[in-house]
């Protein structure tokens, strides 16, 4: 880099004193300098190879070199003086000289330090020699050497001599002799003579007669001789450095081999010493992992399944196969003790949990049995009640008792099996499932239903599905304003699954709460303190998990607030509904269909009396029901005053049968305008009752009938006062049920066509049909069902341990 920059400086001086015409040589010299500058920049790019002093010198030198481009443009494009150009190039070269001096100082303590110092001294001498040559060229070109240039020439000559002295001090005898032999001769003496001549002529104020060509030739020859000495010194330094590096590598290898040998010996000793420690530790580790991954979970499972959890503690965790008495053996004994105590705590916890669960289940079954009996009593009172106000109160009491029963069932679902006695054997339509679920909600009038699925739900799923939907509806009504509607929709998707949506316009939930609730609904967590705060959520999750039903909540997509709960019932739990009854059935066949003969009876519900059973045989499709009329009046009494009587209630839009029955009940004011025989004529002509306008007045009666149909109750009817024929038929049935007409088996004996309605148009077709005694079928199936239930209850006493309590409740 120094040589190239010195050559560029000489080219610049020749360019300035040559009339600024020979720019080609200047460009070529600049190209060589740029190449050397990039090489220098790449050499100092890795700062970890330089110490702090070398890095600082390198940064300064590169900074000076960055100003070289600006100096070139100034020289080429302006009348930049030769003295200024010479001084500026000297500053740049001084930075490179200082970098070389710093490098020499950093290796001065090494064996190669003398060679590096000698090399640096020769470089400094060569720089001052180039300065003298540049001054002589300028003076020879201008034939003038101003005093300032003369002073620079003298200083450069003095610095050259000083650098040569430093070289002689740093170099050995061989290098000194080599320098004296090579840097001598005619050309060196001629250069010295030209320098002295220029100084003498400048001091005498005479023109400079130095030949420029001779000055350039002798200066270049002297510089080449010094470069040759520098190359030899550099070669000696490289040789010394290689020898030092080889010795360092050998030393490193020897030291590494020694260290490896020491490590091998230490490792062998450590293995011999640690064998007695590692083997027990390995056994302890394997045992700990086996206990944590297999033995402890298996022990806890056995504890949970064992009748006596405390008896499993002694054999739950096997002993650790370490029998030493040193520290590792003591750790093994402590490990066994810790796991034994953990298993004991798990056993005690299991005993406590079983006791708490059994107590909660017992507490839930006690009121459940009483509630079932209470519902049976309420059913009897409702059948015999004719006062609309009192009937409405009975309906409200029935509704509250149903809600109490659902709360008891929640405890059975959470802490017991949840499989109670309310089981069904035949499918139920989605319409009836929806109506039964709505009937178990306090604010049932706010619920609007929409069913687009003509399917039925399998009997063993009906109760749990009704319970699940009732919990969702209860939550929706409780978390929304009293004036808003709750939508209960149901439809089939493309896969044949039943999709039910419960939508409200309540306060809603944020995204984090929705994600958390969906996780709990998909995988119900274990019971903890939070269960009491979110009992409905846990119950819904357990019921859905029992039958493979999917439940998820989401925010409403529209602008309204609120949450939509989606319930997906698999197609495997659905079936085709039973075909509806023919419009014009015979009286007794229609009554047999309405009697729900195959419905299981509730716990605590006894067979109806003979009079009620006979009363249930009255036709329902051809005549109105007295109780339906009473329910209609009771619901009308419970309707708010500000609600129009003709407003359609979406919750009862699919309850046409009950609406038709409620239309037959009158208070006497409609008798003149529409006599009863008009309704009879319509019924006889069409085979169905006359439909009345849909409204919300009979919502409570309809929902109560749907709920009782689901739980297995029977709705009884009797003829209206407007038709005395019905009273005659009822009296004939009651007369046939007297003890005198009973056979030896205790069942009432039916006389064919004895209870036929006078002047009935069905008299001709009834005689042609086979005789069917639904009462006998009813009693036989009831006894069969009671026997099956009794067998199940007796089988359950041996597993639940609460047979005594159930017997007391019954």
Image (cartoon, rainbow, N blue to C red):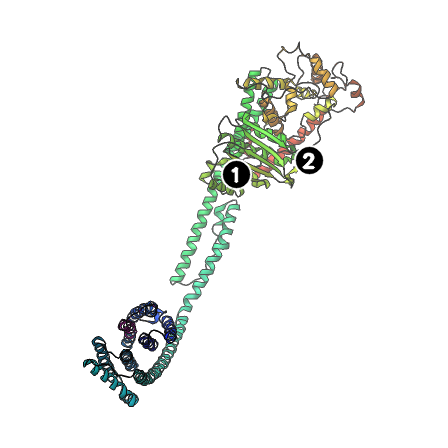
**Left or right relative to 70: residue 436:** right
At horizontal 42% and vertical 66% (from top left) the residue drawn is: 278
Q: Which residue in the structure is indicated by mark 2?
A: 576
Q: Quadrant of residue 205?
A: bottom left
User: Does 804 lie within the magenta span?
Assistant: no
Query: For the point 23% across and 82% down, which residue is it?
Result: 198
Q: Inspect this view and state whether residue 319 appears.
A: no
**Residue 326: percent from left, percent from top:** 38, 63
Q: Earlier in the sequence, mark 1 or mark 2?
A: 1
* Residue positioned most to the top: 672
Instruction: Say above or below: 261 vs 590.
Output: below
Image check: 213 left or right of 513? left
Residue 194, numbered circle: none
Residue 80 in the magenta stretch? The answer is yes
On-image quarter of the N terminus: bottom left
The quarter in which the C terminus is drawn is top right
Q: Main secondary structure of the magenta part?
A: helix
Question: x, y (%) of residue 250?
Answer: 37, 81
Residue 794, quarter of the rendered image: top right
Question: To which residue does mark 1 refer?
Answer: 554
Span colored in magenta = 77-98
Secondary structure of residue under mark 1: strand
On screen, residue 26 versus residue 150, left or right, reads: right
In this orientation, does residue 614 appear? Answer: yes
């Amino acid at each position: 880099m120094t040589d190239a920059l010195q050559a560029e400086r000489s080219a610049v001086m020749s360019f300035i004193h040559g009339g600024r015409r020979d720019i080609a040589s200047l460009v070529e010299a600049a190209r060589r300098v740029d190449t050397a500058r990039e090489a220098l920049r790449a050499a100092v790019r890795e700062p970890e190879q330089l110490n702090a002093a070398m890095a600082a010198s390198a940064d300064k030198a590169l900074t000076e070199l960055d100003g070289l481009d600006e100096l070139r443009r100034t020289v080429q494009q302006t009348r930049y003086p030769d003295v200024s150009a010479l001084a500026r190039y000297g500053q740049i070269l001084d930075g490179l000289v200082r970098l070389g001096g710093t490098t020499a100082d950093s290796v001065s303590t090494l064996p190669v330090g003398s060679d590096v110092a000698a090399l640096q001294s020769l470089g400094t001498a060569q720089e001052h020699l180039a300065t003298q040559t540049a001054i002589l060229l300028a003076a020879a070109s201008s034939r003038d050497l101003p005093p300032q240039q003369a002073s620079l020439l003298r200083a450069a000559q003095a610095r050259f001599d000083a650098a040569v002295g430093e070289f002689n001090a740093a170099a050995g005898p061989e290098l000194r002799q080599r320098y004296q032999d090579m840097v001598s001769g005619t050309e060196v003496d001629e250069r010295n003579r030209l320098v002295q001549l220029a100084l003498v002529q400048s001091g005498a104020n005479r023109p400079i007669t130095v030949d420029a060509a001779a000055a350039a030739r002798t200066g270049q020859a002297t510089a080449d001789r010094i470069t040759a000495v520098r190359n030899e010194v550099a070669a000696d330094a490289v040789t010394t450095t290689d020898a030092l590096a080889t010795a360092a590598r050998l030393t490193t290898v020897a030291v590494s081999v020694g260290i490896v040998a020491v490590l091998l010996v230490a490792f062998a000793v450590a293995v011999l010493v640690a064998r007695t420690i590692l083997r027990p530790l390995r056994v302890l580790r394997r045992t700990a992992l086996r206990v944590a991954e297999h033995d402890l979970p298996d022990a806890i499972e056995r504890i949970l399944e064992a009748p006596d959890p405390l008896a499993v503690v002694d054999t739950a965790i096997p002993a650790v196969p370490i029998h030493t008495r040193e520290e590792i053996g003591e750790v093994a004994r402590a490990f066994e003790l810790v796991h034994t105590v953990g298993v004991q705590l798990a056993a005690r916890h299991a005993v406590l949990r079983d006791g708490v669960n059994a107590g909660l289940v017992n507490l839930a079954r006690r009121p459940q049995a009483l509630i079932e009996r209470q519902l049976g009593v309420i059913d009897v009172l409702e059948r015999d009640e004719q006062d609309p106000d009192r009937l409405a109160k009975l309906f409200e009491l029935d509704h509250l008792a149903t809600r109490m029963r659902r709360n008891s069932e929640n405890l059975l679902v959470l802490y017991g099996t949840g499989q109670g006695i309310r089981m069904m054997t035949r499918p139920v339509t989605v319409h009836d499932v929806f109506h039964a679920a709505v009937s178990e909600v306090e604010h049932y009038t706010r619920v609007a239903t929409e069913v687009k699925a003509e399917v039925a739900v399998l009997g063993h799923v009906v109760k749990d599905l009704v319970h699940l939907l009732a919990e969702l509806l209860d939550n929706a009504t409780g978390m929304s304003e009293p004036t808003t509607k709750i939508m209960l929709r149901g439809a089939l998707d493309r896969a044949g699954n039943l999709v039910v949506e419960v939508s409200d316009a309540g306060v809603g939930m944020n995204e984090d709460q929705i994600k958390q609730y969906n996780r709990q609904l998909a995988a119900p967590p274990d019971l903890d303190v939070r269960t009491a705060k979110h009992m409905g959520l846990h119950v819904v999750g357990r019921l859905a998990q029992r039958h493979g039903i999917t439940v998820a909540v989401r925010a409403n997509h529209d602008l309204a607030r609120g949450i939509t709960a989606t319930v997906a019932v698999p197609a495997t739990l659905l079936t085709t509904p039973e075909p509806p009854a023919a419009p014009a059935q015979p009286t007794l066949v229609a009554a047999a269909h309405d009697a729900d003969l195959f419905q299981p009876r509730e716990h605590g519900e006894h067979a109806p009396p003979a009079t009620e059973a006979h009363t249930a045989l009255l036709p329902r499709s051809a005549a109105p029901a007295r109780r339906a009329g009473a329910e209609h009046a009771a619901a009308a009494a419970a309707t708010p005053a500000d609600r129009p009587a003709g407003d359609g209630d979406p919750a009862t839009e699919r309850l046409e049968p009950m609406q038709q029955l409620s239309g037959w009940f009158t208070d006497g004011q409609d008798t003149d305008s529409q006599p009863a025989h008009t309704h009879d004529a319509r019924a006889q002509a069409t085979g169905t009752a006359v439909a009345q306008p849909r409204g919300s007045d009979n919502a409570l009666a309809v929902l109560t009938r749907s709920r009782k149909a689901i739980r297995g109750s029977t709705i009884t009817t009797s003829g209206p006062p407007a038709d005395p024929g019905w009273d005659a038929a009822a009296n004939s049935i009651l007369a046939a049920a007297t003890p005198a007409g009973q056979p030896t088996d205790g069942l009432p004996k039916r006389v064919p066509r004895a209870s036929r309605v006078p002047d009935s148009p069905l008299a001709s077709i009834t005689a042609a049909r086979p005789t069917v005694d639904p009462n006998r079928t009813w009693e036989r199936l009831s006894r069969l069902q009671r026997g099956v239930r009794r067998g199940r209850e007796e089988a359950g006493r041996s597993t639940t341990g609460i047979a005594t309590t159930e017997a007391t409740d019954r």
